[in-house]
Amino acid sequence: MKLRNLFGLLLVAGAVAFSMSNIPLYAQEGEAAASEEAASSSDGAEAEGAEAEEAAPAEGGQTFFDIVFGGGAMDITVWMLIFLTSLATIALIIDSFLSIRASKIMPVELVKAVKDALSEGDLGAAIEACESTPGPLSNILLAGFNNISEGYDVILDAVSSAASIETEKLMQRVNYLNLCGQLAPMFGLMGTVTGMVAAFGGLATASGAAKAAKPAMSISGALYTTAVGLFIAIPAILGFTFIKNNASKIILTMEALTYDLIKTLKGAEVEDGEEAAEE
């Protein structure tokens, strides 16, 4: 994935986050109506004034911006880690869909050029075709072509080793996506735990009706980290499973194609041995 594409994703995510920051996450209209009804049925004017005072700061609701940046340094750090994990998940999914494709790993032009060159016995043309089209298949074929003088068994070993290396390279990209799927809920859980600690700490210092309302709002905000973490982890794990299966299928096809292409080298070796015996 190119760096400019990652920056583009960062800008889009930032725009979405700031647009969401103006959306109230808690609808207080029903609660305000219930408070007014309870206040009207109350006999004491003092209790009515207290209810109105508590309902006043809740009218606007809590925005996403307030939840993210309204906590302490630890809460903000956790949210930043969650946002970075989400950006990495999006970037890895897009990169995997663009990079792990049969047409990109096994170009049709390369396969055709190598087949034609080997069928004509032109090993130099096959090597040139691989060098002009770099990629996993080219690296595997070049590993075999570079050991042509060592015999067919050595060629097979070289091809097998190169195929293992290329497979590991492809799967490493996919495994990073799995890592994001595991880290996101862990970051969310960490944010919830730290938020709960802060909420119960505030419960000890609060008094009156705010003793229940303020910690409840803090706990509700803290639970958003777990919710967002799971929201990131679910598509990350689904994407990992799909991309991994697709990559495994492509790898098996590439290995079968490679062994099919180098069969020609075995035939050339036998012919050279027969000609040497006749001489």
Image (cartoon, rainbow, N blue to C red):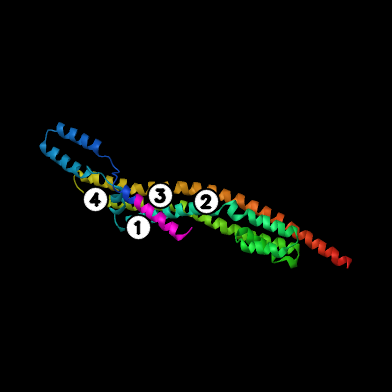
User: Which sits in the foreground, 208 or 23?
Assistant: 23
Viewer-side label of 2, 1:
2
Residue 81 in picture, x, y percent from top left: 39, 56
- Labelled pair 3, 1 in contact (Cβ < 8 Å): no
Q: Amino acid at mark 1?
A: Thr
Question: Can you see residue 4?
Answer: yes
Residue 173 in picture, x, y percent from top left: 53, 56
Residue 90 in picture, x, y percent from top left: 45, 52
Residue placed farthest to the right in the image?
278
Q: Secondary structure at mark 2?
A: helix
Residue under numbered circle 3: 229
Q: Please name the predominant secondary structure of the magenta segment in the image.
A: helix
Q: Amino acid at mark 2?
A: Phe
Q: Disc 3 or 2, which lies upstream in sequence?
A: 2
Residue sitting at x 33%, y 55%? 75
Position of residue 21 in the picture relative to residue 242 (left or right): left
Q: Secondary structure at mark 3?
A: helix
> What segment carries the magenta color?
1-16
Q: Secondary structure at mark 1?
A: helix
Q: Residue 77: give its label.
A: 1
